[in-house]
Every structure is written in structure tokens, then in C-alpha cells.
Image: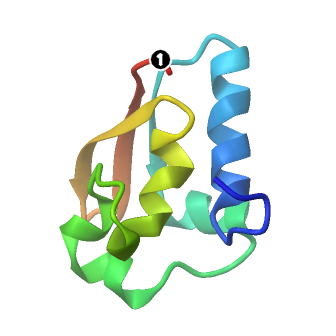
Amino acid sequence: MSISSDYYPLSQHLNKLVEKGITQITLTFSEIEDVLKRNLPPTARKNPTWWSNSRTEKYRQCASWLDYGWEKKKVDLKGEKIEFQYMAK
């Protein structure tokens, strides 16, 4: 994950959680936007595949958790929250 990526702050946030011993967390979309200091794109609220665990060019944002050993476990579009679990690098 490049430091210039829009999603790098999420990478850093998740990395700090691991340093504190936290290996599973549910974040609201609003909390993620606070971390990013920007709004998520509309697709993130409409399409669950935006939150996939894919490393393709189409889903570049996924590197912000995958590169740090996290995986998306559940996404709740209606409740606007996502569960991540640390799987180690």
C-alpha cells in the first residue's frame, strides 16, 4: 500500500490495532471516513464487492487491509459497518 494512496490512513489505523493486540474489529463506515478524512465512494455503500478481499486493480482499496494481514469477514451495507479480522502477514 503506497503512502500516497487515499486508503493508506486505514492501513495505518489497522496496523495500530494489531500493535495494541486487537485482532478483530467492526468499524462503521462513518468511523472509516473519520480515519480517511474523506467520504467513502458511493460504491462502498451500494456494492458489497467493493469490500472484497481481492488484490485486483479494480479493488485497489482492498490492499489497505490485505497488505497489513487483515481480511474483511462481514459487510453490512444496510447497517453501514464492516468486520475485519487480522490473519497475520
Residue 53 placement, left or right of 19: left
Q: Nearer the viewer, residue 39 or 51?
A: 51
Name above or below for residue 40 compared with residue 75.
below
Is 25 situated above or below 76?
above
Q: Residues within 10 Å of mark 1 (few under 14, many from 20)?
A: few
| Residue sticking out furthest to the front | 57
Amino acid at the residue labelled 1: Ala
Residue at screen point 66% across, 26% down: 17
Identity of the residue furthest to the bottom in this view:
42
Residue 46 is at least partly visible in this image: yes
Name the residue: 29% across, 54% down. 54
Residue drawn at 63 percent across, 53 percent down: 1
One can see residue 78 in this view:
no
Is residue 16 toward the left or the right of residue 78 in the image? Answer: right
Residue located farthest toward the top when viewing the structure as drawn: 21
Q: How many discs mark residues in the rendered view? A: 1
- How is colour applied across the structure in the image? rainbow
Q: Position of residue 76 (x, y in %)?
A: 23, 58
Residue 11 image position (x, y, % from top left): 64, 46
Is residue 45 depicted above or below 18 in this figure? Answer: below
Q: Secondary structure at mark 1?
A: loop
Above or below residue 8? Residue 46 is below
Residue 53, how many percent across, how many down? 29, 49
Q: In which image quadrant can residue 79 be found?
A: bottom left
Residue at horizontal 71 percent and vertical 58 percent from the top: 2
How far from the left and from the top, in percent, is residue 5? 69, 68
For mark 1, what is the residue? 88
